[in-house]
Image (spheres, rainbow, N blue to C red):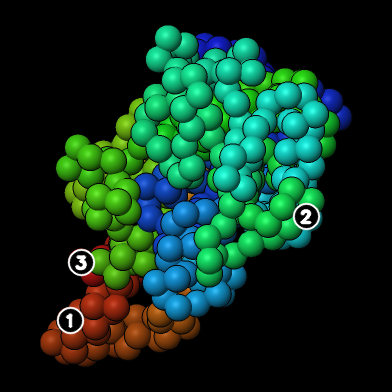
Amino acid sequence: MMRLYNTLSRREEDFAPLRDNTVRMYTCGLTVYNRGHIGNFRTFVCLDVLRRALKYQCGYAVRQVMNFTDVDDRTIAGAQKAGLPLREYTDQFIEAFREDARTLGLEQAEESPRATDEANLRAMTDVITALERNGHTYRSDGSIYFKISTFEGYGKLAKLDHAGIQPGARIDSDSYAKDDARDFVLWKATRPDEPTWDYGQGPGRPGWHLECSAMALRLLGEPPIDLHAGGVDLIFPHHENEIAQSEGATRQLFSRFWVHVEHLLIDEEKMSKSLGNVFTVPDLVTQGFRPSALRYLCISTHYRKQLKFSWASLQQAEEAVQRLVDFLARLESIRAAAAHPDTQARVVKAREEFGATLEQDLNTAGALGIVFDLVRALNTAIDGGDVGLPDVAVIRSAFEDIDRVLGVLALRRSEDEAAAIPAGEVERLIGERKAARSRRDFAEADRIRQDLADRGIVLEDSAAGTRWKVVGKAQ
């Protein structure tokens, strides 16, 4: 059974869906005022592995909602600066997110709503109506606020000190300082030239926190949902305010589990657009690195530990992925017909250890360690002649199961298939190089090798012939 660290209780707990063997999971998606950076995608990759582990390791069905926040202070300011309608401005970043998500091998969520979809805006006004009925709101200057003093559990997720809560103080901005607990805006009176809607609460637009509550309740059904997830920076105020709104409106527990992914750091600072220290997925590709290496890097450290990014660490991730690829390629050279029960037993044991480690709070770092221990053991077995064709089938099946959760090797294969040089052309050039060497034209053979290397294809000669591979950077 999966055990997950629940931010709400501050401890690891056994996790299983509440009903129908289906995990109802809400993931806070991107605020689309700019292209997502790799700090954002550290969270999304880790949560993609959680989704996969729940499906493929634990055997649950998953219904995931990952939203796009396409109206808030930043998206409105960005659209105004660009001279574009809000929808057109945010469309470009939603498409960029989808492109980057595909590039990193993220499984697609079952629902990816936009806050400005009419059904979601109507759901937001319904939540406000319920909150008003339950005595949690007040109006001022055309805006509607949540009065946190009316919700007894306020602060339970972030473990706020209630002595620090400022009674009667309120805040209109969508983002504010850590532990600055004030009444927050639900429905915001709009200024001239800002987008506005009116579905029964007067002209205005939703506050950021309201959007996720309404979309989760609309698309995942009666609370509590099973799991709510996002980056650690969302614990307060966003997720705390989501709890207050949702539970204030429904008078039921909102989410049973809260899972948060730690920051990606660069030069000891959180990667963020406000600090200007950001890299995007295309930035890494431009530097010659492959998305599968970034995916590997994101899960090489436990999701609750900060991940320190550097070009060196990304290169190490590339080398780790290549070791896995090289090992699997080595299996192609095996021709012996005999089976080796001890080898197969070692594979089965490692597969079980991988699953058990993964189920301990999604310990991807430990699970990867088990995979590389297995690779070392199997390389030794191959050297000793203790791997035959029946064993290869068992090994390949185990790695397919493992990668169904990790998603790294399948992504690497798709990158290879989309390589700039078609496989047929590579094979043709290898043939020409072989012919050049046969006639002792080593200058031409070296030229072909270098030409391929410049285009990211490395040749490896052995007694069995020449093998080629696509690498992240030309060697």
**Helix, strand or loop at disc 2?**
loop
Q: Which residue is mark 2?
A: 199
Judging depth in this view, the residue of 134 and 88 nearest the camera is: 134
What residue lies at 19% left-to-right and 85% top-to-bottom? 447
Mark 3 Cα-neighbour bin, 10 Å: few <14, some 14–19, many ≥20:
few
Mark 1 Cα-neighbour bin, 10 Å: few <14, some 14–19, many ≥20:
some
Q: Which residue is mark 1?
A: 446
Q: Which residue is mark 3?
A: 475
Judging depth in this view, the residue of 260 and 85 nearest the camera is: 85
Image quadrant of residue 258?
Answer: top right
Mark 2 Cα-neighbour bin, 10 Å: few <14, some 14–19, many ≥20:
some
Q: Is residue 174 above or below residue 435?
A: above
Instruction: Tell me if I can see residue 383 in this picture.
Output: no
What residue lies at 30% left-to-right and 58% top-to-bottom? 279
Percent x, y of residue 39 = 37, 47
Q: On the picture, is 326 further left or further right than 279?
A: right
What residue lies at 73% left-to-right and 38% top-to-bottom? 128
**In this rendering, the label closer to the viewer, 2 or 3:** 2
Question: Which corner quadrant holds the C terminus?
Answer: bottom left
